């Protein structure tokens, strides 16, 4: 698998750390984890994307749809801004207009 995912709790939120590549193949693994978080986290889910080294359209589309679905449940999802190629892609697509994106974990928790 091209992605490692760590789920942890912190100050009233669930944080999901991503490391590696989120693509059409690894998104099924990520989908299972996000679905589980939807059943256990009733307030704030933080996706830490700082460790992503690559994302394709399937992976990015999944993240955007997950964010909207979580919002539709009346919950809050925040992304921690990725670096490099993935960060540039998110900025170029202006996803910060759709999704709360913070520069670091501390800002996401506040």
Image: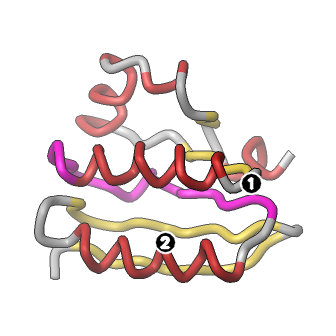
Q: Please tell me which residue lies in front, 19 or 41.
A: 41
Q: CA distance from mark 1 to mark 2?
A: 13 Å
In magenta segment, residue 12: no
Residue 15 left/right relative to 27: right
Labels 1 and 2 touching (C-beta < 8 A): no
The numbered disc on residue 10 is none
Q: Main secondary structure of the magenta part?
A: strand
The numbered disc on residue 34 is 2
In magenta segment, residue 57: yes
In the rendered view, tell whether residue 59 sits above or below residue 110. below
Magenta region: 43-58
Say which residue appears at 61% left-offset and 55% top-offset: 70
Residue 85 left/right relative to 47: left
Q: Position of residue 36 (x, y in %)?
A: 54, 82
Color scheme of the displayed model: secondary structure
The numbered disc on residue 75 is 1
Say which residue appears at 64% left-offset and 44% top-offset: 104
Q: Please tell me which residue lies in front, 57 or 5.
A: 57
Q: Quadrant of the C terminus?
A: top right
- N-term-proximal mark, 1 vs 2: 2
Say which residue appears at 64% left-offset and 36% top-offset: 102
Residue 97 left/right relative to 76: left
In the rendered view, tell whether residue 96 sits above or below residue 82. above
Q: Under tag 1, what secondary structure?
A: loop
Q: Residue furthest front?
A: 72
Q: Under tag 2, what secondary structure?
A: helix
Q: Position of residue 55 (x, y in %)?
A: 21, 49
């Amino acid at each position: 698998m091209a992605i490692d995912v760590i789920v942890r709790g912190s100050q009233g939120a669930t944080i999901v750390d991503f490391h590696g590549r989120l693509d059409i193949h690894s998104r099924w693994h990520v989908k299972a984890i996000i679905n589980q978080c939807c059943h256990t986290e009733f307030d704030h889910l933080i996706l830490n994307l700082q460790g992503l080294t690559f994302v394709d359209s399937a992976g990015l589309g999944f993240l955007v749809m997950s964010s909207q679905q979580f919002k539709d449940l009346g919950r809050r999802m925040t992304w921690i801004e990725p670096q490099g190629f993935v960060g540039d892609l998110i900025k170029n697509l202006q996803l910060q207009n759709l999704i709360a994106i913070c520069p670091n974990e501390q800002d996401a928790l506040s």
